[in-house]
Image: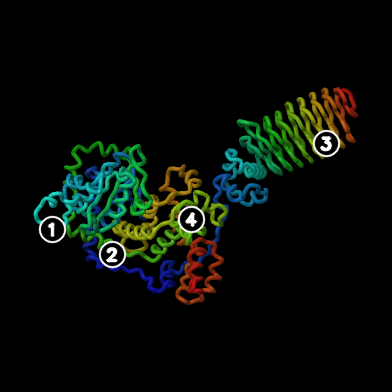
C-alpha cells in the first residue's frame, strides 16, 4: 500500500495562485473598509487572525461541492455576506445574487426550488422529450439556501440529494451546472423553525456561528451611509477563469503526514466504540453514550478519551471536509508549505461541532454551562490532536511496522496490548488479528 | 511510501516518547464524577485514591443534590479537614466528617438538619448547630459539639466525646461501649439503652426508659428521669435527681 501524500490535480502556476490569494485578501479588506462585514478576528491560524464567518465563506468559495452553514441570530450578516461574496466571485450584481437564493418556509416545494415541467408542452402539437423549466437557483453554481431550518423536516430531505452534488434531477431530467459552492443559513430554534435532520447536518461541511457586531463594530457600521447594493459595486470582481482556478490553487496546498494522521485519528477517535455494532458509533440508533451505553465501560469518564463524550460517530465525509478546509484555509493564510497542524486545530471544531451531540453531563459543567458546544468540541479536538502528536507515536510506529511486515503481527499485538487507548484497542489490534487470521 | 515511512514522516523521528496510559481520575470536576467511578458504596481508601490533590475544597462547596454522591461528599469533607491546617467551613450535609481522623470541620446550617454527621470518626472536631439523626454513630475518637440533635445520636459510640448544648431527642447513646456524652438540656426516651461502657451526663430532665438494660458505664441525670428508669439494669452506675414510676435500681440523689 502506498501512503504517500500527493495531489492528483494539475496545479496552476505559482504566480497565478499567489495572485488569486492576494485578490481574496483584497476582497476581505474591501468588505471591512466598505463596512460591509465587520466582525471579531476569532479564528487563529498560527500568527494570523481572521473572522471565522468571513474566513469560512471565503474558503468555501475556493472549494467546490462543499457546504458552509452560517448559524446565528437574526441580522447577523449571514445572508448578505454570502450574497456579497457571490456577486464578487461570480461577477454579477448584488441584486441578482439576492434573486438567486431560495428561502425556507413551509410552502416551499420542489417545483419552486428546483424547477417544474413546462405546462405549454401538453398543448403543443409537437411531441418532443419532456422539458423541465429549471429555476435560476438550480442552474446556478452558487447556491444559497436561506433559513434552511424554516423548511419543514420532510422538505429538508430535498437537500440531502442536492448538497455536495454536481447535478440535479427532476422528473427524470438532469441538469448539470457543474462544481458548485453551497451555502446555507439558519437561525437558532424559533417558534417557526423545524429541527434539522442529522443526515442533512452531516452534509454540511462546516458550521460557523454568526455573531452580532460588538461595540466597536457597531460604531463602525453606524458610519455606513450607502446601501449595501451600491457598496457591493466597489468590491473586487473575479473573472470566470479566476473563479475556475480557485479549487486548483487550493489543491496545490499539500497536507503533511502529521496533519493527515491527526485528521484520521480524530475521526476514528470519535467513532470507535467498544459496545457499538462493528465498533462503530454511526451504527447506533436508540442506545447512545448519553443514554447509559457507556456505564461501566473502561473508558467512561476518562477525560482524555473522546468516545464517551459525544453521542455520534463521524462519517468519512468529515475526513474529506477536514482535509478540504484545512487546505483552503492554508491557501487563504498563504501557508502553502510546512505543517498545517495549527490550521487543522482552528478549522476542525467548525467542521465537527454541528455533527456531534455532546454528553450532557459533561457539557452542562463549567466552562460550557450546557450552551457552548463549539468550545466543548474545540477542547475535544485539541485533546485528540495533542494525543496523536505527543502520545500515539510509539503505538503508531509499532502498528505501521507490522503492516509493512517488518515485525510479525503477533509481536506487534503483544506490544500494542500494553497501550490503553481506544484507537489501539479497537482499531489497531483487530486489524492485526485480521493479519494473523485472514479468515476472520 | 509504506505505512511506516508515513508514520516516521509524521512524527519526524520523535514518535517514541511515552506509552499511552489511561489516567483515571485526573480530572474530577464534581462529586458525581467520583460517584460514577466508585459505585454506590465506596470505601474511604477508594475515595482518597481518586480525590484530586488540588481543588478538593471546590468539590465540597456544596453537598450533592443526589443521594448517590452523599457518602463520597462526606469522605471528601473529612479528607479536606485532615489536610487543612485551619478549620474547614462547609454547608451542612449528610455524612459530613465521615470517618474523619483529624482537623476541624465547621458545618454551616442548611435547609434541614444533616444526618450521619461524624459517623465512624476517629479524631478531629466537628462544630455545628442542629444535627439530624445518627449524629456521631459508631465514633471512636474526636469530638462533636452541636446545639441540638435528633434521634439515635452517638449510637454505638466507642470513644471520643459529644456535647449537645441544647436538647437531645430519643435514643441518645444507645449501645455505647465508650466515649463521653454531655447534654446540657433534656434528653428523650431510652437514653443510655444497652450501655456497656462510657459516660452519659444529662443536665436537664430525661424521658422514660433511661438506662434500660444498662450493663456498664455511668449515666448521670441532674434533673428527673421518666418512668421505668434503670429497668432490667445489670451493671454500671445510674444516678438521677428523681425518677418516675416503676423505676429499677437507680441511685437517687442531687447531683
Looking at the rendered image, the disc whose residue lies closer to the viewer, 4 or 2, is: 4
Task: Pick whichever, A107 or A178, lies toward us.
Answer: A107
The image position of residue B184, as x and y in percent, is 76, 26
A106 or B149: nearer the eye? A106
Q: Which residue is mark 4?
A: A307
Badge 2 element: loop
Chain letter of disc 1 in the image: A
Same chain for labels 4 and 1? Say yes or no: yes
Marked residue nearer the N-terminal end (1 or 2): 1
Q: Secondary structure at mark 1?
A: loop
Residue wearing tag 3 = B194
Are labels 1 and 2 on one chain?
yes
Q: Residues within 10 Å of mark 1 (few under 14, many from 20)?
A: few
Residue visible at 80% across and 31% down? Answer: B191
Circle 1 is placed at which residue position? Answer: A128
Q: CA distance from mark 1 to mark 2?
A: 46 Å
Within-10-Å neighbours for mark 3: few <14, some 14–19, many 20+: many
Instruction: Please identify the quarter of the rendering in which residue B81 is found.
Output: top right
How far apart marks 3 and 2 lie (CA) works out to 89 Å
* Total tally of numbered discs in the picture: 4
Residue B150's place in the image compared with A118, above or below, is above
Picture layout, residue A347 above or below residue B210? below
Disc 4 crowd, CA 10 A, few/some/many (<14, 14-19, 20+): many
Q: Mark 1 or mark 2, which is nearer to you?
A: 1
- SS for tag 3? loop
For the residues marked 1 and 3, what is the alpha-carbon distance in whole angstroms? 107 Å
Residue A410: horizontal and vertical position, in percent? 54, 74
What residue is rendered at 75% in x and 34% in y? B162
Q: In this view of the protein, which residue sits in the foreground, A99 or A263?
A: A99
Secondary structure of the residue carrying tag 4 is helix
Q: Where residue A305 sits in the image (x, y, percent)?
A: 50, 56
Amino acid at each position: 500500500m502506498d501512503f504517500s501524500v500527493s495531489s492528483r490535480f494539475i496545479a496552476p502556476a505559482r504566480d497565478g495562485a499567489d495572485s488569486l490569494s492576494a485578490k481574496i485578501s483584497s476582497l476581505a479588506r474591501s468588505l471591512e473598509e466598505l463596512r460591509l462585514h465587520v466582525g471579531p478576528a476569532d479564528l487563529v491560524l498560527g500568527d494570523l487572525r481572521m473572522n471565522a464567518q468571513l474566513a469560512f465563506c471565503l474558503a468555501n468559495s475556493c472549494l467546490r461541492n462543499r457546504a458552509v452553514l452560517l448559524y446565528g441570530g437574526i441580522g447577523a450578516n449571514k445572508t448578505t455576506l454570502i450574497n456579497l461574496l457571490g456577486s464578487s466571485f461570480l461577477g454579477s450584481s448584488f441584486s441578482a445574487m439576492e434573486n438567486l437564493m431560495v428561502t425556507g418556509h413551509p410552502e416551499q416545494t420542489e417545483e419552486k426550488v428546483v424547477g417544474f415541467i413546462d405546462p405549454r408542452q401538453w398543448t403543443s402539437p409537437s411531441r418532443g422529450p419532456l422539458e423541465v423549466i429549471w429555476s435560476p437557483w438550480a442552474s446556478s453554481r452558487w447556491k444559497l439556501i436561506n433559513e434552511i431550518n424554516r423548511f419543514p423536516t420532510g422538505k429538508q430531505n430535498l437537500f440531502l440529494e442536492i448538497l455536495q452534488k454536481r447535478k440535479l434531477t427532476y422528473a427524470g431530467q438532469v441538469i448539470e451546472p457543474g462544481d458548485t459552492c453551497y451555502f446555507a443559513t439558519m437561525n437558532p430554534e424559533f417558534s417557526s423553525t423545524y429541527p434539522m435532520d442529522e443526515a442533512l447536518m452531516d452534509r454540511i461541511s462546516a458550521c460557523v456561528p454568526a455573531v452580532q457586531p460588538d461595540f466597536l463594530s457597531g460604531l463602525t457600521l453606524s458610519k455606513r451611509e450607502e446601501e449595501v447594493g451600491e457598496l457591493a459595486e466597489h468590491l473586487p470582481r473575479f473573472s470566470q477563469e479566476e473563479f475556475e482556478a480557485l479549487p486548483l490553487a487550493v489543491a496545490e496546498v499539500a497536507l503533511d503526514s502529521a496533519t493527515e494522521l491527526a485528521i484520521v485519528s480524530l475521526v476514528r477517535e470519535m467513532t470507535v466504540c467498544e459496545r457499538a455494532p462493528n465498533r462503530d458509533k454511526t451504527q447506533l440508533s436508540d442506545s447512545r453514550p448519553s443514554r447509559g451505553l457507556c456505564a461501566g465501560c473502561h473508558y467512561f469518564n476518562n477525560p482524555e478519551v473522546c468516545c464517551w463524550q459525544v453521542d455520534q460517530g463521524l462519517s468519512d465525509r468529515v475526513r474529506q471536509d477536514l482535509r478540504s478546509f484545512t487546505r483552503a484555509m492554508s491557501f487563504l493564510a498563504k501557508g502553502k508549505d510546512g505543517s498545517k497542524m495549527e490550521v487543522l486545530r482552528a478549522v476542525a471544531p467548525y467542521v465537527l461541532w454541528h455533527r456531534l451531540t455532546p454528553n450532557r453531563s459533561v457539557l452542562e459543567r463549567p466552562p460550557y454551562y450546557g450552551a457552548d458546544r463549539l468550545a466543548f468540541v474545540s477542547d475535544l479536538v485539541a485533546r485528540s490532536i495533542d494525543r496523536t502528536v505527543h502520545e500515539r507515536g510509539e503505538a503508531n510506529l509499532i502498528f505501521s511496522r507490522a503492516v509493512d511486515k517488518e515485525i510479525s503481527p503477533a509481536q506487534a499485538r503483544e506490544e500494542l496490548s500494553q497501550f490503553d487507548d481506544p484507537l489501539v484497542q479497537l482499531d489497531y489490534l483487530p486489524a492485526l488479528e485480521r493479519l494473523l487470521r485472514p479468515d476472520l | 511510501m509504506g505505512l511506516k515511512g508515513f508514520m516516521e514522516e509524521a512524527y519526524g523521528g520523535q514518535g517514541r516518547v511515552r506509552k499511552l496510559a489511561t489516567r483515571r481520575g485526573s480530572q474530577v470536576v464534581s462529586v458525581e464524577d467520583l460517584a460514577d467511578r466508585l459505585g454506590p458504596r465506596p470505601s474511604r481508601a477508594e475515595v482518597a485514591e481518586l480525590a484530586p490533590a488540588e481543588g478538593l475544597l471546590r468539590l465540597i462547596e456544596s453537598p450533592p443534590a443526589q443521594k448517590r454522591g452523599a457518602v463520597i461528599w462526606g469522605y471528601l469533607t473529612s479528607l479536606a479537614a485532615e489536610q487543612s491546617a485551619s478549620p474547614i467551613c462547609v454547608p451542612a450535609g449528610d455524612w459530613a466528617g465521615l470517618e474523619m481522623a483529624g482537623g476541624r470541620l465547621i458545618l454551616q446550617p442548611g435547609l434541614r438538619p444533616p444526618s450521619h454527621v461524624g459517623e465512624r470518626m476517629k479524631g478531629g472536631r466537628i462544630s455545628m448547630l442542629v444535627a439530624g439523626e445518627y449524629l456521631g454513630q459508631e465514633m471512636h475518637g474526636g469530638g462533636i459539639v452541636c446545639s441540638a440533635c435528633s434521634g439515635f445520636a452517638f449510637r454505638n459510640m466507642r470513644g471520643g466525646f459529644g456535647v449537645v448544648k441544647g436538647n437531645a431527642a430519643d435514643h441518645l447513646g444507645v449501645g455505647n461501649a465508650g466515649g463521653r456524652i454531655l447534654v446540657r438540656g433534656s434528653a428523650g426516651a431510652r437514653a443510655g439503652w444497652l450501655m456497656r461502657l462510657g459516660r452519659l451526663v444529662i443536665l436537664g430532665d430525661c424521658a422514660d426508659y433511661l438506662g434500660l438494660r444498662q450493663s456498664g458505664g455511668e449515666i448521670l441525670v441532674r434533673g428527673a428521669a421518666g418512668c421505668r428508669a434503670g429497668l432490667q439494669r445489670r451493671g454500671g452506675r445510674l444516678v438521677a435527681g428523681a425518677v418516675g414510676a416503676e423505676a429499677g435500681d437507680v441511685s437517687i440523689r442531687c447531683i
